[in-house]
Image (cartoon, rainbow, N blue to C red):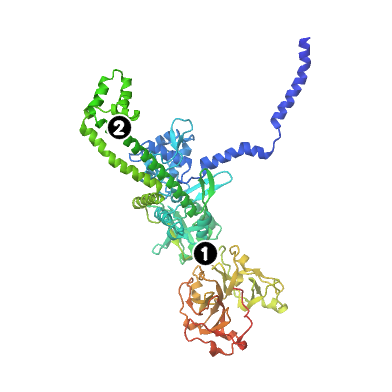
Amino acid sequence: MARKKKDEQQPKNREVAGVMGLRGSVEEQPITHTLEINYMPYAMSVIVSRAIPEIDGFKPSHRKLLYTMYKMGLLGGGRTKSANIVGQTMRLNPHGDAAIYETMVRLSRGHGALLHPFVDSKGNFGKVYSRDMAYAASRYTEAKLDGICAELFRDIDSDTVDMVDNYDGTMKEPTLMPTTFPNVLVSANTGIAVGMASNICGFNLREVCQTTIALLKNPDHDVLETLPAPDFPTGGQLLYDIREMRAIYETGRGSFKVRAKWRYVKEDNLIEVYEIPYTTTTEAIMDKVADLIKAAKIREISDMRDETDLSGLKLTIDLKRGVDPEKLMAKLFRMTPLMDSYPCNFNVLIAGMPRVMGVKEILQEWIAWRRECIRRRVYFQLGKKKDKLHLLKGLERILLDIDKAIAIIRETELEAEVIPNLMIGFGIDQIQAEYVAEIKLRNINKEYILKRIAETDDLEKEIADLEDILKSPRRIGKIITAELEQVVKKYALPRKTEILEQWEAAAEEEENEAPTASPVTVFVSKGGYFKKITPQSLRASAEQKFKEGDSLAFSRETDTQAEILVFTDHFHCYKAKVGEFDDCKASTLGEFLPTKLAMEPGENVLQVVFPGDYGGFILFAFDNGKVAKVPMNAYDTKSNRRKLTGAFSDKSPVKTILPMTADDLLAAYSTDGRAMIFSSALLIPKTTRSTQGVSVLTLRKNSALERMTLLSQTTIVNQSRYKAKAIPAAGNILKPEDLEEKQISLDV
């Protein structure tokens, strides 16, 4: 009966088990729950323990490798095989030997990825500028710590940073390195985590330390004054735009361009490229040039080869006869990685949390962290000195009666009672008694004890000084400053990347010149719309259509090969040829110049100028009453350029941009109803485009220059009333008969 009952129940039990098994394998749960329980711990582990650097400038893999080398005695000794270092590092870093060795390669002097390498290497460690130059196996290479690592480990044994157990609890390792300089900005660092990344460019050690010192003295210091731009171990030329750089410094995000350095060897008719951007390799450059030659987009090159040797990088480009090297390099910068962008993402772990910070904020965080390191070091030293002073105070008691101490020890029958008897006999504590009891027999004399006690006064002074340091943030700041100055003195190197402040942006596309010049009429609206209309189309319909609220600024008869200069409120000048624009009809709006010329977001057109043969000059009238006279040929470039930065001064808003072929009489109007007539011959031409000009109109309080125009285009009757013999001049109040409608011009 029992067996039968059990058999009857089996199918039912099996059915239930099957359902339960099915439910266990496909149980539904919200995706948010799965992400929180399974994915988030993994993501946080990658962010915190792998990919994002901390305030000392290191990732965990870097820190574990360098600390292992430090414990191996490789800071001052000779080199050892890299394979030995990799094996020892596995005690802290549970990864494969290949991953650990790759970390060592990047930190090595031979690889050249850092401005100040931390590993003094011997052997083939590859090169950062080469994709295919493989580094030798770890059994062939040797390494030790570079001299600058002394600044990483200074006072690491003085409780300056927290020490934690390694992954199996067999040894301790530091959570951070107590670096005496802001390595987080000196050493370039890149990491890709889960959902975020970090890309920190390197800066010159001297400039970083000087900026930190300046911030310690003045928290409002402008870091751009002492830290103008990043620096790279591969050199190159950084195309400097102060607005872009300031945005990067303030937000921690942005990008800038770096291009190669080259020289032309006239005797051999060839170009030598000897420095390239940090973000590219020689192989990537040569591959791209080869592709362009195959596609017949570059015809000026007869051969290109890599002549890199022990003396350094060198790419040689053989030119065909009659080729202009300047124009060829401009084309190569535009079309190959010889000019590349470096994207910045200053993402740093602060107290275990990732934060994207600007340069100043990073330095302020480093200063706060370094202050804490100094305090911990002082506390450690203070404790040691107090302990020593405590022992010497016990010795001082013994000095009162050495014979009594000897008698206590001799008359004590049990060894365990020696310490208690000394404590009772002299009124000292156990630590002092043990110290006294451990003194050698030969040292139980007055001379020895008096020498030890003589240290008491010095110790008390040192303790008082250390306690004062702990109470004085100013003194801690001086200590940090002194350490930074020593780092600069010992390890600073000249800047490798040249800062190029005056440069012209290359066009994104090649200029398509029309084979013959065709007559056209150009219409430009105040809103920045450009129309190119043929004579036939204009005869068919001459009535121009504009966007609502827009109107005609000016029109001009010209041809398709004529150039135009477009000045914008971002202080840029865009160059283009009339032939690049599509033919329009009068009934269309035309082409929007900011879109056509690929202007920056929010950039607006101020004026369109036809330079002709680049004779004459351009006048820039500014809000502050100054006028700049810039020769037109300052905007003439030998190579094919589209964007010129720093086209005019950014110190005051521009009110009028006026092209002129010869000197003439001008009328300047102020916002308080005054006018002044002067000759442009009184203005001295300036060779630099960004000149602030000279004062022309003397302004009263709360007034500004409103506009400036040719006198012949005004309706001023009483001209002698407003004429100025010298500038600056205040002008006179306009009489009713001299008032006029505002001249038609672009809004500026």
Position of residue 731 measured from the top left corner of the image (x, y, whole percent): 53, 84
The residue at 56%/40% (across/down) is: 44
Q: Which mark identifies residue 666?
A: none
Above or below — where is 280 with respect to 709?
above
Quadrant into which the N terminus falls: top right
Would you say residue 299 is visible in this rendering? Answer: no
| Badge number at residue 505 | 1
- Give the class, few, some or many, for how many residues have Cα within 10 Å of label 1's Cα (few <14, many ≥20): some
| Left/right of residue 213 with respect to residue 287 in the rendered view | left
Looking at numbered disc 1 in the image, what kind of residue is underneath it? Ala
Residue density around tag 2, few if under 14, some if 14–19, many if 20 or more, within 10 Å: many
Q: Residue furthest top?
A: 1
Let me know if residue 454 appears in the view.
yes
The residue that label 2 is drawn on is: 394
x, y (%) of residue 56? Answer: 45, 45
| Residue at x 52% of width, y 74% of height | 624
Q: Is residue 667 left or right of residue 316?
A: right
- What separation in Å lies between label 1 and label 2 (alpha carbons)? 77 Å
Kind of residue at badge 2: Gly
Element type at mark 2: helix
Q: Position of residue 527 (x, y in %)?
A: 64, 71
Give the total of numbered labels.
2
Q: Nearer the viewer, mark 1 or mark 2?
A: 2
